[in-house]
Every structure is written in structure tokens, then in C-alpha cells.
Image (cartoon, helix red, strand yellow):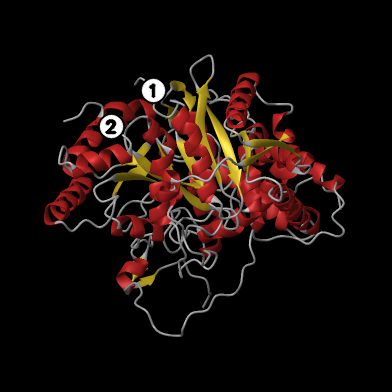
Amino acid sequence: MNKDSIDIDYVARLARIDLSEKERRLFSSQLEGILEYFKKLDQVDVSSVEPMAHAFQVENVLREDESVKGFDPETAVKHAAAKRNQMVQVPKVVEG
Amino acid sequence: MPDNLHFKTVTDLQSLLAGGEISSVELCRELIDRKEAVDSKIQAFNSLDAENVLANAEASDQRRANGELRGPLDGIPIGLKDVIAVSGSPLTCSSRMLENFVPPYDATVSRKLKEAGAIPFGRLNMDEFAMGSSTENSAFNTTFNPWSSDRVAGGSSGGSAAAVSAGSVPVSLGSDTGGSIRQPASFCGVVGMKPTYGRVSRFGLVAYASSLDQIGPFGRSVADVAQVLQSIAGHDPKDSTSIEKAVPGYPEILQNPIGPWKLGVPKEYFEEGLDPEVKACIQKAIDWYADQGCEIQEIQMPNMDLAIAVYYIIATAEASSNLARYDGVRYSHRSEQSEDAIDLYFKSRAEGFGEEVKRRIILGTYVLSSGYYDAYYLRAQKIRTLIREDFMKAYESVDALLTPTSPFVSFRAGEKNEDPLAMYLSDIFTISANLAGIPGISVPCGFNSENLPIGLQILGKPFGESDLLAIANSFEQAHDFSSQHPDL
């Protein structure tokens, strides 16, 4: 696969962002420059190296299965742009 | 009342408060006035709720009168980067996306500071969602450098550094994902520390790159930074990556430092791209440590050159995932133009995010996308291992490393705006500490010929904050750089 080109429309769709024509052009050229810079990583032999996701070993942390106080419904939905009956309101997602 | 109250350290303020020479209300009034006088020039603050500050100060004075102080920071104002939640106070991340967001809960650091009696003092400006190195990416204002108002404060915690430097608040908190505490501290001539990953809870810190983000303090002295770190460090059940390890008494360590230290100087940090005046200044600091009997060793960090590329793959990948939550549904900006539910995501994110945030989300999405994951993300994670190994190998023979914090002093606003890669390269000396998870501190070590501050970076072993503070403190005590202030 060609590592140099970036299909900006495809990636923007994956990222769920509408880009303006100006942003499409700007990001395409800038990101190609950045990907070119990333090529320096290709020189390193990593065949026997383990990947590292965290600085320290991360383990699953569980707590006792006891209920704790959370937000009341009014607080939880307070910042939704649209709400009704303590619920977040969104555009229709299912036809019918 | 004593003169120049706004430039007093926390240590000084504590004795003034204890001796009854000032009250917390008087101190906070003075700082509110100071902020009013200088912040139109600096633009370090996104907001300041003066009424709330004074109410908290009055409560602290009352506790003092009743002999019920909560701790040494009781009555001391502390500025918070606008990425840390304080219940009932706006939390914008300097983004249109969260312009009207008021969190209903405290970050663990905010809770701990309140429990210690400290007074949250304003929301400090930053690059949007902590993405940037100059605080020019804020959706609201650029924060300027108190030492030269046409130059940047650094970033992303530019507001936190500039507010302390300008005398608007004695200490503050920032967050550091690739240098966002240390670099602005260096640019603004204050002390800034990034603790070990896991030393301080990230609960209530808006996530940028979760495996790299860490909260840390700014102050006008190492002792002040030690005090703030003391009050925020420790394990938190609400952050599964915070580490269960006893927190030493940082301020006490400064009273009884254990030197001289073995200090490493990585030669890769002194090669091309380093400003000659910065280089000379750092060399002078290294010579000073040698004169104190510290053993100086040249160290090799062969993978250091790869850190920027590794960082901008890992950080943007994590950011693209973390920022998926801003979908316009539950609490962030919602577009009024959308045609359907899916279009709501596309338009809300297009309207809510600024250019740099979009650029990083797009880059992060790309490196994680099918067909590219192994070539970019997995490879970067493997080289991250090599970078960490470089540090661990160095720490077999030395206690800490001495480097410049930044290759140059503060640059002019607008100078690097058009070229994202040039901006990314400005993080070259700070970024590998985040990849390795180790602690780092920037301490003022001089000025260039234009009177702009230069910072010395000291990098330590995991959980080696005590050593870093002691090493930095010994330098600070022997010099007067930290006690010099900008003329505003």
C-alpha cells in the first residue's frame, strides 16, 4: 500500500468531521509532509521489540460491586442541546 | 500591607498569613486587581469568578481565626488550566466545542486542593484541547509572554505559566502530554513540573492522549511546586492508571537534600537546532553542578531523534479516539444545521473543533485506519519501547539527566503558525519523557541577550520527583533567576 497518499475524504468520513474545501486542501498537503517526516521510523529494525501502550504495566482494576451515588437525571442531561423528560433528544434515527 | 504581594512565593505568603500581616481576602483582592491590571495584555485567563474566590478566601480566614486550618495551602489561590474540572465552574478547554460546559463534579486534583483549603483562582487559557505549543490554538485568545508581549507564552499550558510569571497568581496547575508544562515554564521564566505518569490522578482532566497526559504544578519557586505536588499526588480509585505507591514528603526533602548527584548529559540534546545562547546557558548550569561536586557523565540516547514522529503518531491516535465523545449529543456543541442523526455528528464536529484539533484527529484516524495500523501505530509503539529503554539504561549510571527544556527561547506570535511540523519540532526535548512516563522539571537558568528566560530541564527516574526537586532547588538557591520578574 502506498504510504504517501492520504485519501482525505475517506479519513474525514471515518472521523465524522465535515471538512471545508480549504481544510481539505490544507490538510492534504500538510499531512503528506508529516507522513514524509514519519518515514524516519522505517529505518529502525523493530522485529524483536515489544510494543508499548503504557509507561507502566496496566492491569484491570475492579471495585466491589456496590452501588455508589451518581448524578441525578437532571444533572446528567443538563448540557444536552435538546432534552425532554430527563432524556437527551436527538434527530430521528429509525424510520417508521 | 507588604509591597509587591503579587510576586511573593507561596512560602512567603504562608508566613504573612500565619503572622496575621495579611488575610486571604486581602491577598485574593490584590491578585484580582493585579489580574485586572495586566491580563488585557497577557490574556492568560479564560475566566475568573472573583465573587467565588473572595467567598472562599473569607471562609479560609474564618478557619484560620478558629484554629481549624486544613493544611499549609489553606487560603492560597491556585490557577487551574481550563482542562481540569471544578464543579460549577466553566470548563472550556479553550474550545467552541465546550464553550458553555459547566462540569457537575470536581477533578480529583481540584477536590484535593479544596480539601487542603487552597482557592481555585480562574480558568487559564491553553491550546484547544491541549493541542499545541504556543497557546495560539485557543479558540478565544492567544496568551502572550509576560517578558515580551509580542511573543508566545508557550503551550499548551500557556495561561498557567503566564499567569504565574505575570504575578496574577502564585501557583497553578497545567497538564503535560508532550511538554505542555515544561516548555511554557521555560518560555515564561517559572518552574514547571511534569510528574511521573500515574503519580497524579487524571480523573477530571479532559483527555487528550491518555497514555501520555499528566497534571503538574507551576510556581515561582521549586519549594512552591513541591508543596502543590504534595497536595495533588497519590493513588485514586477513580483513575486506574494512577499508581498505588506511597507519596514522600516533597517539601521536607528540600530541607535535607541528598547530594551530590550523578548527572547525565545526553549528547543528542546538544546537536543541531539548539540556539547558541540557550546552549551556552545550559552548559553554564552543567558546569555549576560539576563545581558542586556532582559527577557529570555524557550519555547516549540513540533513539531520541525518533521521539517526535513516535509522539505525533501515538498522541494523535489516542486523541482521535478520545475526542470521538464530542458528538453534539450529550453535552458538547450541537449544530443547528444538521439534516439527520449522522449529519449531526459531522456538522457539530466541523463547527466545534478548531483547525489544529481537526488536523490531529484526521492524522490520528489515518494512522489507526485499516491497512496503516501496523505501519504507523504499531511501529510507533515498538519504538516507544526503545525510547523508554534508552532512559532506563541511562538511569543505571546516573540519578537524573540535564538538558535544555526547549531548543530556543519564546518565539514571536504567528512565527510557526503556518507550518505544523515546525511547531511540532519545538517539543523535541520534552516529548520523550512523556513517551517513557518519567518525571521532568523545568527551572529558570538564565536569560538571553534580549532578556528572555531560558529553562533547564531535569529528567528523573520513574517516581524520582524527590531527586528532581532537590536537584532543581539546589540550583535555584544558588542563583537569582527565579526571583526576577517581568516588568509589566
Query: Left or right: where does residue B392 sit relative to residue B7?
Result: right
Kind of residue at badge 2? His
Residue B189 in view: no
Crowding around mark 2 (Cα neighbors within 10 Å: few <14, some 14 to 19, many 20+) is: many
Residue, disc 1: B486
For the N terminus of chain B, the quadrant is top left
Give the structural element (helix, strand or loop) at label 1: loop
Q: Residue at x 65, y 19 (%)?
A: B276
Image coords of residue B63 (percent x, y): 16, 55
Quadrant position of the C terminus of chain B in the picture: top left
- The residue depicted at 36 percent of the width and 29 percent of the height is B166
Q: Residue placed at 74% from the left, 28% from the top?
A: B271
Count how many numbered circles sit on residues in the image: 2
Which residue in the rendered view is the most extreme toward the bottom? A65
Q: Secondary structure at mark 2?
A: helix
Task: Please state if B268 lies on the left or on the right of B11 as rendered.
Answer: right
Q: Is residue B34 above or below residue B242?
A: above
- Using the image, determine if residue B184 lies above or below residue B393: above
Query: Mark 1 falls within which chain?
Result: B
Q: Position of residue A49 (x, y in %)?
A: 82, 59
Residue occupied by mark 2:
B6
